[in-house]
Image (cartoon, rainbow, N blue to C red):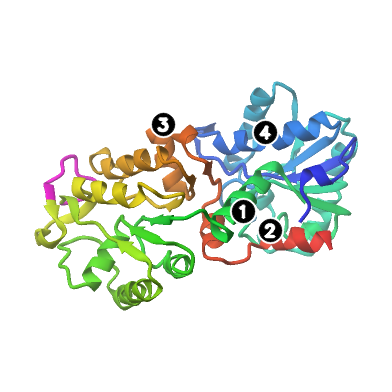
Amino acid sequence: MLFLDQVDIQGKRIIMRVDYNVPLKDGAITDDNRIRASLPTINYLLEKGASVVLCSHLGKPKGKKRPELSLKPVAERLKELLNRDVIMAPDCIGEEVLNLAQNLKPGQIMLLENLRFHPGEQKNDPEFARELARMGEIYVNDAFGVAHREHASVVEVTKYVPKCCAGLLLEREWKYLRKALKNPERPFVAVSGGAKVSSKLGILNSLLDKVDRLIIGGAMANTFLQAQGVAMGRSLVEKDLISEAQKILVTAREKGVSLYLPVDFITGTSPDGELASGVCPYQDIPQEEMALDIGPATHTLFAEVLRDARTVVWNGPMGAFENSTFAQGSLNLAESIAHLDALTIVGGGDTDALIHKAGLTEKFSFISTGGGSFLQFLEGRELPAFKALEECKQ
């Protein structure tokens, strides 16, 4: 695919896909990280004398105009961050909007209204994509968060614009993840956490062909322990995936991948509980208790497994970290990874939130802005956004 520095954008009108799907509370943005992530590309375009038409979705309006999901608060925040005016379009397609786009002067920015106010966006509708393409002379995709979506503004639009390229953020995502998976420095350690094995099966199987060591924590570790005959009390276990977990354990052995599971847990009666019941070895979880975080012996074990790692990819917390009672294991792991002399890559919404909570964002090599896209990339699946940009180049 083409990158920004390979395209002549001087004085051109750019239609740029961004990911401004930010959390809102009472109409106010509670986390502007996704907006900030787009600033380097926007500033680069403005410095080159381009005019910029930004497009994004917000929430799930299901093809209907819902005022509470308008991108107006985003336009206001963007205006503050860029310290320049941002025109808010009344819609994302139509003659009125096209007229506004065509009259933009070099250095001006316009934000289109929520793409998902139109059903054509999620249907990857050619007519909707064609209308969108009229807004710019060059298409720039800088939205890794939707790179796994076959939507009109991600895929179909590339067929109707003379030139397409990846923005600076998308380029960084592609290069970092590709470097980690295609040619990693070794030892390469993957850390997989979170609640469900079901959402990570493809990733775990894919990683077994690439990594030297695999750490599994979070509630998904419960299924693996039960697959080895360990009684997990009232802990979350995906019983229908026990045979799959057993297969992964066997495959890891056959491929010479060292696989590590928790050896002790912080237990409690509920993920929402204000007090933990205590620490217990994995073999001794009481019948009425739940494993809700990794224990201190597990932290020591995982830290030792990571000690000489040269590449680390981490997705998913080690426990019910939203509750501070059961967050310590995840925070300890974040601290351990943050201080490694290694390429350290983190992805997924929960893990991203955890790193911010720990105040360690500057200590990681790269924090991916994608949730589903990051997981699909790890799984080795082709992302529709990358494929569309490659085909556009040809």
State the separation of the CA atoms marked 4 and 3: 21 Å
- Within-10-Å neighbours for mark 3: few <14, some 14–19, many 20+: few
Please state the horizontal and vertical placement of residue 4, each as a whole percent of the image: 78, 44
Please state the horizontal and vertical placement of residue 122, each as a whole percent of the image: 65, 60
Q: Secondary structure at mark 1?
A: helix
Asked whether the residues under the numbered discs 2 and 3 touch, taking CB atoms below 8 Å apart as contact, a structural biologist would say no
Q: What residue is disc 4 on? A: 39
Residue in the picture at 17% in, 64% down: 232
Query: What is the number of the mark on residue 385?
Result: 2
Please state the horizontal and vertical placement of residue 109, each as a whole percent of the image: 78, 32
Residue stretch rendered in magenta on the structure: 269-279
Asked whether the residues under the numbered discs 2 and 1 touch, taking CB atoms below 8 Å apart as contact, a structural biologist would say yes
Which of disc 3 and disc 4 is earlier in sequence?
4
The amino acid on which the numbered mark 1 sits, given as a three-letter code, is Val
Which of disc 4 and disc 1 is earlier in sequence?
4
Please state the horizontal and vertical placement of residue 57, each as a whole percent of the image: 64, 47
State the separation of the CA atoms marked 1 and 4: 17 Å
Q: What residue is disc 3 on? A: 359
Q: Secondary structure at mark 3?
A: loop
For the C terminus, give its image quadrant. bottom right
